Image (cartoon, grey):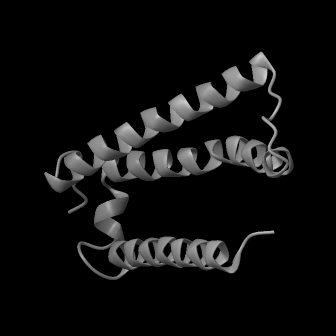
Amino acid sequence: MASPDDQDRRCRIWCRSRGLLLIGLLRVFFFEKGAAYYGHSVPFIIKMACFAAVGLLSIYPTLEFLSWRSALKQGQVPILSEQKLRRIRSIMHWELVAVVIILLAAALMARGIGVVAVW
């Protein structure tokens, strides 16, 4: 069982993450340039697609890591097949590729590149 300090730390991280997501959604729909602008921005659409892909790709490794808890608590090394290790490593590499694309899309957005004019 996790200590109260670990649970408190996880709660703070979770709350901050939710807060950042909420601020981002508020900026898109109510502030800044508005949903119409961002909806016609190719880099923004790419960025959101990659963000969703990272979230979905992280499910498998996270579940696998969580399954190791009992072995780790007993001081044992989790047993992994070579195929499972390759799969986790490959997924994490694709997540990193998506994060780089997110950063590139953010740079394009900051310069106003890729916006399809709707006026």
Please indicate, yes or no, whether residue 116 appears anywhere in the rendered image. no
In the image, residue 90 sits, relative to residue 55, either above or below, namely above
Residue at the far top in the pictured view: 82
Picture coordinates of residue 92 (x, y %)?
Answer: 56, 34
Residue at image x 64%, y 47%? 56
Say which quadrant the C terminus sits in: bottom left
Residue at image x 82%, y 39%? 76
In the image, residue 86 sits, relative to residue 75, either above or below, namely above
Residue 65, quarter of the rendered image? top right
In the image, residue 115 sits, relative to residue 18, either above or below, namely above
Picture coordinates of residue 60 (x, y %)?
Answer: 73, 42
Residue at image x 36%, y 72%? 28
For the residue pair 85 and 3, the one nearer the viewer reads as: 3
Picture coordinates of residue 59 (x, y %)?
Answer: 69, 48
Residue 85, quarter of the rendered image? top right
On the rendered structure, is 26 left or right of 51?
left
For the residue pair 31 and 78, the one nearer the viewer reads as: 78
Please indicate, yes or no, whether residue 59 appears anywhere in the rendered image. yes
Residue at image x 42%, y 73%? 20
Residue at the far left in the pictured view: 111
